[in-house]
Amino acid sequence: MSKPGRWLFKQEPTCYSYADLERDGTTLWDGVTNNQARLHLRNVKIGDQVLYYHTGKEKAVVGEMVVVEGPTRDTQSDDAKAVVLKVKAVRRLPAPVTLAEIKQTPAFAEWELVKNSRLSVMPVSGEVWRLIEKMAAR
């Protein structure tokens, strides 16, 4: 069996925050409209780990999720290319890791979060994941 993939999903906390996910336990991840983000979303598998990133004013990685249902067509959308999947809350990070901190850390320079900040779904390498965890544990 292959190792789980690692991803970062972004959401505006005024729309749906990590606290909302903690309250609900699971949620359907929908509303992704960017073609590159949708391509990434279609590659997500059950069991993959996901960092939850608050966009907007906060701009920080705040929690971890796990994928519990793989990507399927969003039957609630008129867009035939729309994709949804189900995620479950795993844990809130001990401390948020801000975009400002990430941009100040050279090890993140090639990460899509730094290079293409508008992308709402992106892969996360094992090295980046470990560094985020280390920074959150400070």
Image (cartoon, rainbow, N blue to C red):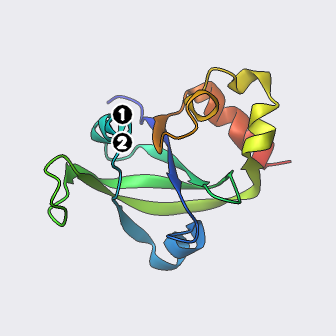
- Closer to the camera in the image, 115 or 106: 115
Badge count: 2
Q: Position of residue 60 (x, y in %)?
A: 69, 52
Q: Position of residue 94 (x, y in %)?
A: 76, 58
SS class, disc 2 = loop
Q: Position of residue 128 (x, y in %)?
A: 64, 30
Mark 1 Cα shell of 10 Å, populated few (<14), some (14-19), many (≥20)? some
Are the residues flagged by discs 1 and 2 in contact, CB closer than 8 Å? yes
Question: Height in image: 38 above or below 77?
Answer: above
- The residue under the point 48% across, 39% down is 119
The image quarter in which residue 24 lies: bottom left
Q: Position of residue 97 (x, y in %)?
A: 74, 48
Mark 2 Cα shell of 10 Å, populated few (<14), some (14-19), many (≥20)? few
Residue at the spot of label 1: 36
Residue at the spot of label 2: 34
Q: Residue furthest bottom?
A: 23
Question: Height in image: 57 above or below 105?
Answer: below
Three-letter code for the amino acid on which mark 1 is drawn: Gln
- The residue under the point 19% across, 51% down is 72
Three-letter code for the amino acid on which mark 2 is drawn: Asn
Along the horizontal axis of the image, is 24 left or right of 59?
Answer: left
- The residue under the point 36% across, 35% down is 40
